[in-house]
Amino acid sequence: MFQTFTFLLVWLAVAATAFAQTQPAPLPKISAPVTGPGAMFPGLQRVPAGTGLPDLKYTVTEYFVSGTASGQPYTTRILVRRPDDPKRFSGVVVAEPMHASGNSWMFYFTRIYMMRNGHVSVEIAPQKAGTEATIVPSNPERYKAISLPSADQANEILAQVGALLKGNGSTSPLNGLRVRRLIMMGTSQSAGTLRGYLPAHAAWRMPDGKPIFDGFLATSTAGMPIPRIDVPLIQIATQTEVNGGAAKGSAYRRADGDAPGDQFRLYEIAGMPHNDSRESPTYDPDPCKMPVTRFPVGAMMAMALHHTIAWADKGTLPPRAERIAVENGAIAVDEQGNARGGVRNTYVDVPVAKYGVPNVADPKPGTRDDFYCGIAGYEIPLPAARLHTLYMDAGAYYRKVEQRLDELAKAGWFLPEYRDQVLGDAARVRIAANPAQSSTSALPDWSGVWQMVGGTVFDRATASGPGGALSVGLRQKPPYNAEWEAIYQRNLKLRDANQLPDPINTCGTPAGFPRVMNLPDMYEFVVRPEQTWILTENGPNVLRIYTDGRQHPAPDDRWPTYTGDSVGKWEGDTLVFSTLSTKQSKWPTEGDTVLDRTGLVLSDAAHVTTRLRRLDAQTMEARMVIEDPKALTAPWNVTKTYRKAEPGTRVYDYGCAENNRNPVDAATGKTLILGPEGQTFGK
């Protein structure tokens, strides 16, 4: 008990001494919103479409702030980015010293997270050199009041503006919004400004002696150590900083801590470079020798900001991460060439590329490409055979990414705001199902011109009468249910009365799938590693079959088309492909298509699996298994064959003029055939 009391007295004495060495930051004066003359220096470079302030219902307002710092008067500007609707304000303000480049880089990185969560961003311009090099010359008339006599004023300006924001006073630019927490963040050059402020953090305080800033996020700090302070601080080292410090002993590293006075986390993020080449217009077009990386820098910066806010606001301890592995003065990598250890992510844990630093410039005289490429990363795709070994196909890869993403989110390493971004990247990955056939030389030879064997009734076993089975008793297919059998019987009667219109008689209407496999005239099969095209002279029609590893679109992203969506893979010399999302119908009363002129129809739920192969030098075969839960009671098997035409056979245009269609006899409703002189047949 006595020891506890003695410890308390000592602690109070230390606290009292510390408070005696601090002083309240004086509040600067603030102008009315600056509206002119001329355009405002935006402080934010171009962002991808749909991610700007108007898109997320935010506005930006400019103010001048004036006061005395380091014994000299100053005037500078701040930008306040806030929700249009004050009710959306979270109570958290995140301040950022303006980067010397003139861009609010940390807001740029984290804007989606900040704006979706209602946080206010305040950019402060405390630096003499950066402000005079960017803001002032952009509009000298508008910014003629700005005056920063000394570079030594930066810390006091940050403290004064911070106290103004956090004080919730009537002169605050946030008057009407109740500020609960104030965070400062910075990256690279602006992280240097933040780091330079930390000694002043202990000296300049709110009137009650409490800190002005409740937490700090310092990223890309050039390998410099961070001092201990009395509020939470998270430091991010990108792979660029880890790489730069590896040979020098990584002097910035220190142990994580939770105790008062040492609330600290160091996050070294595997795969992430110093600069964001995914979104920054600096890298469009790519100025670097190796492909710049599309690693989502913003997602990882936002994750760290989220933990900084939660720690400062609610006392929620952030997760701890191991450091990136360094061996023999260099980053240690795994068998795919990616960094071991550090904060993990799907890009290095479920890789399709090697993510490394630094990139190098593709030399262009008179540019700064060498600098910008040096702070960018690169990604080099893994070989097709390696991807196949790791994942087999794109579907399996996507599922692994999704599973790992869920694990990372649960552990606190990923935010839901960026989930769609990662899964969107995963959905675009193509993995050859058979890497041995990822080159043209390994593919079968289907060159030449081909013609379907037999008539154009889609399946001779489906219909009695012309072109079909000669006896009614032989008809066994398709295995329609009662509803669709009635539709087919109706169409047969219309066919027999010559009153069933054919949609492809309308100029330009595609035959659709699977009818495209059942046309007269000539076919060509164009085989590439990433796609196979089936081209028909009749129509003409094109069926594209993707063999680059992609899957069918998700159900919500599908819409019916005439030829549907076809994806396939090679099984030896056989192309096996799946087709769905076809534009089928109850023609002619509803919809757009039929399978042939007997009136065969399918629903929009039809799914066809086709095995296409060359049987011999002169014969191609397509075996189709048609499944349709709306129309069929069992799978329907149909085989079509194609004979190779004589060498040198040409494929011609299929002439079709607007309104070129068979006339219909008004009296009988029958379709008529016109002769070469315009006379009619078939009345």
Image (cartoon, rainbow, N blue to C red):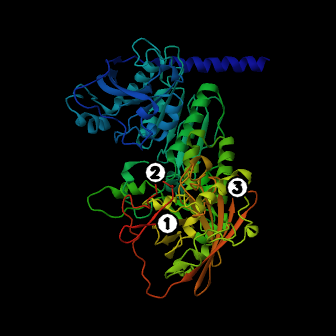
Q: Which residue is mark 2?
A: 278
Q: Looking at the image, is mark 2 or mark 1 earlier in the sequence? A: 2
Is residue 335 something one can see in this rendering? yes
Q: Residues within 10 Å of mark 3 (few under 14, many from 20)?
A: some
Between disc 2 and disc 3, the foreground one is: 3
Q: Secondary structure at mark 1?
A: loop
Q: Looking at the image, is mark 1 or mark 3 earlier in the sequence? A: 3
Q: Nearer the viewer, residue 90 or 366?
A: 90
Q: Quadrant of residue 677?
A: bottom left
Looking at the picture, which amino acid does disc 1 mark? Gly
* Residue 485 image label: 3
Task: Look at the numbered discs 2 and 3 and tell me whether their residues touch, using CB distance below 8 Å.
Answer: no
Number of callouts: 3
Is residue 453 left or right of 480 when viewed as pictured?
Answer: left
Q: Secondary structure at mark 2?
A: loop
Looking at the picture, which amino acid does disc 2 mark? Arg
Which residue is depicted at the point 63% across and 17% down? Answer: 12
Q: Secondary structure at mark 3?
A: helix
Q: Quadrant of residue 148?
A: top left
Q: Nearer the viewer, residue 323 or 638?
A: 638
Residue 353, position as x, y percentages in the image: 55, 62
Q: Which residue is mark 1?
A: 682
Q: Residues within 10 Å of mark 2 (few under 14, many from 20)?
A: some
Q: Residues within 10 Å of mark 1 (few under 14, many from 20)?
A: few
Is residue 548 something one can see in this rendering? no
Residue 683, position as x, y percentages in the image: 48, 63
Vertical comparison of 495 with 125: above or below: below
